[in-house]
């Protein structure tokens, strides 16, 4: 399964969420991730994220596509260096 | 065509981009939009966005799917009130 994940998280919690998401997906923009993930791993990510989030103010949106080929991606402007993902 | 658009834009230009994107798509999170749009309208949006953006630092990512049904959306935490989109 291919997912796009975008978060909007309060400053105090944002670093924790960033670190968590980077364990499961590729970081492509400030608060956006993408990648191939299994249902089980995605559930795990959601549970772990819920524990960090303040659900009154924070939000996490996940778009799922059964196949990556159904999605076409285009980037305008600065593209995050793929190497940064591993720093 | 169904698109998801996420931006990462410098503070000085972010309001202009926000206003622009709201003319074409539905605002679903801080810097994320989605919606049905034609190829022509999307091209127009991209051209107008390019004029506002500083392409050395800003970025705009667009995911396109031929059909919305190929994408499954899930929101965890606070959901933006659909009415806010029109304010």
Image (cartoon, coloured by chain):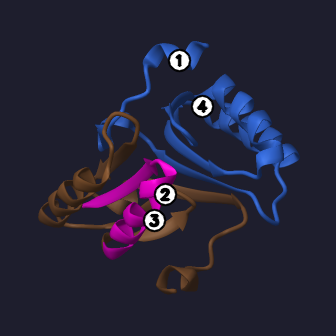
Chain colours: A blue, B brown
Residue B10, can we see it?
yes
User: Mark 2 to mark 4: distance in Å?
Assistant: 24 Å
Q: Are marks 1 and 3 on the same chain?
A: no
**Dot placed on the residue nearer the N-terminal end, 4 or 1:** 4
Q: Residue furthest left?
A: B40
How many angstroms separate mark 4 from mark 3 (CA)? 37 Å
Q: Position of residue A74 (x, y in %)?
A: 28, 40
Residue named by callout 1 = A84
Badge 4 element: loop
Taking depth in this image into account, of A14 and B12 the one nearest to the observer is B12
Q: Nearer the viewer, mark 4 or mark 3?
A: 3
Q: Nearer the viewer, residue A37 or B50?
A: B50
| Identity of the residue furthest to the front in this view | B12
On screen, A18 above or below B8?
Answer: above
- Please state the chain letter of the residue tagged with numbered disc 4 in the rendered image: A
Q: Do the residues at discs 2 and 4 belong to one chain?
A: no
Across and down, in percent, residue A26 comes to 53, 27
Q: Which residues are magenta?
A: B1-23
Q: Chain of mark 2?
A: B
Per the image, the residue denoted by label 4 is A38
Pick whichever, B3 or B20, lies toward us. Answer: B20
Q: CA distance from mark 1 to mark 3?
A: 27 Å
Report how far apart the C-alphas of labels 4 and 1 lie in the structure: 24 Å
Label 2, on which residue? B32
Mark in the foreground, 1 or 3: 3
Are callouts 3 and 2 both on one chain? yes
In the rendered image, residues at marks 1 and 2 fall on the same chain: no
Label drawn at residue A42? none
In the image, is A60 to the left or to the right of B1? right
- Labels 3, 2: front one: 3
């Amino acid at each position: 399964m291919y997912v796009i994940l975008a978060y909007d998280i309060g400053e105090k919690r944002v670093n924790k969420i960033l670190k968590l998401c980077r364990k499961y997906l590729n970081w492509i923009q400030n608060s956006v991730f993408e990648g191939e993930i299994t249902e089980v791993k995605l559930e795990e990510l959601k549970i772990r994220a819920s524990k960090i989030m303040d659900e009154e103010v924070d939000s996490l949106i996940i778009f799922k596509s059964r196949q990556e080929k159904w999605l076409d991606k285009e980037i305008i402007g600065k593209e995050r260096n793929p190497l940064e993902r591993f720093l």
